[in-house]
Amino acid sequence: MPLSRPGLRARRTSTPAPPGLRRGRALLAGAALAGAAAWIAAACSTPSSGVDGGDLLGVFERDAGAGATAADGGQPRPAAARQDAGARAAASQPPKPPEARPPSEGSCVAEQGQPRRELRKTLGRPPCRGAQVLEARDAEGSPRYACVIAPSGVETRAPLPLIVFFHAEGDNPTAVDKETGLRKLGATWNLTGDPAHAGFIVLAPQGRAFKNPTQGERERGSKTYTAIAPFDVEFTGDGNVDVATVDAFVDQLLEKKLVDRRRIYALGASYGGHMAATYAMMRADRVAAFATFGSDAPPATWACPGPPPPAMAIYRACDDVFPCESVERWLRARDAQTAQTAFLRLDEASRDEPHCALRNRCSAKKGAINHARWPKPREADLLRFFAGHTLAVGADVATSAETAAGRDARTPDAR
């Protein structure tokens, strides 16, 4: 990039300068060029280009969005600072074995709401190519389906981790192939650390087409986005049809001895993220951890002793359906419950973004597009999170509980 303006020419001297002066001028010119290059590089970089996704940077010290009004008044998030410091200290250490969480018995969600029974239509068999389609009939009498995507030679690799993928509203289980790279990653990605059990299985249950949105869905709806949930997350009683249907599909895979009971994870997009969180809490004796994309707090509330299951929240700085500030209020609420929570705040290109988008920089159209764009480039981060969490099963339960009790006794203020 030329440093002189067009049309201007350097003035020449009639007498050559002495060698010492020429060397001094050369040094000054070099320093000027270096300074100019540094200025150009800084001017061309984005605010998030130098941000490490694992570095929390104390971003929850206050609400990041301009004009945001947090329910907690933007109170500090001390757990984030501790997690940030711990992540930096552990960056040079070898990977640690995953932490086994003791399962919680029964449903850990306070019962609320009423079952949703009014369907707009009954959904048929999803066109999942290269996948096994499981069938069941739920308690309401509706046929239900789920697609199972497994790596080749799954019988010889089994038992394998299982990711239960809850699709977004207006979508179906084929979103696993249309939106994500989970099929390809599931063929080789090792979540267990054991070469004999490399790969993972994806179970994608199909939701339902409800006739009318709930009040919460109507409030979140916009002119550019129709919010119709595919799963019933408003009702958290024992008779939740969607939870029971997913149980039936998972049981089918367990009976075939394909699934590692210690490594069952829930994952969901948008309103499917609400279902992933709800299923993980209602089945805390089955799900090791869960993750969401473009989702805030589900209606379900944790009701068991101890923290809810570990979670990873991935969200856009600009989102018109579940705004950035709303997601971060949920993260602060999880901190108050001493829940293990990882997060990735992203821009429209899935790069790390250090703060929520300013309101005048996040139009409804842009926010709707961002909300629907699955963060495919960050799936490796998601899988690394899952690999770090297991569920204590059988004889592991007592050992894990003793380990947790000893850790809490040594570090009473760690939470």
Image (tube, rainbow, N blue to C red):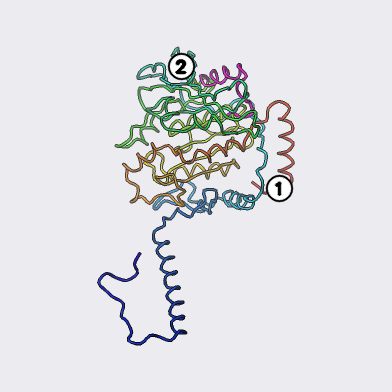
The residue carrying pointer 2 sits among few (fewer than 14), some (14 to 19) or many (20 or more) residues within 10 Å by Cα, namely: many
Between residue 201 and residue 208, name the one nearer to us. Answer: 201
x then y, percent, for residue 202: 52, 26
Between residue 287 and residue 184, name the one nearer to us. Answer: 184
Disc nearer the start of the sequence (2/1): 2
Checking the image for residue 411, the label placed there is 1
Checking the image for residue 144, the label placed there is 2
The residue carrying pointer 1 sits among few (fewer than 14), some (14 to 19) or many (20 or more) residues within 10 Å by Cα, namely: few
Q: CA distance from mark 2 to mark 1?
A: 47 Å
Amino acid type for the residue under numbered disc 2: Arg
x then y, percent, for residue 73: 48, 50
**Range drawn in magenta:** 244-264
Position of 115 with respect to 152 (left or right) is left
x then y, percent, for residue 387: 60, 36
Residue at 33% of width from left, 51% of height from top? Answer: 360
Residue at 56% of width from left, 28% of height from top? Answer: 200
x then y, percent, for residue 413: 67, 49
Image quarter of the N terminus:
bottom left
Amino acid type for the residue under numbered disc 1: Thr
Residue at 49% of width from left, 41% of height from top? Answer: 378
Q: Can residue 281 be found in the magenta stretch?
A: no
Q: Can residue 248 be found in the magenta stretch?
A: yes
Q: How many marks?
A: 2
Q: In the displayed structure, would residue 399 be above or below residue 155? A: below
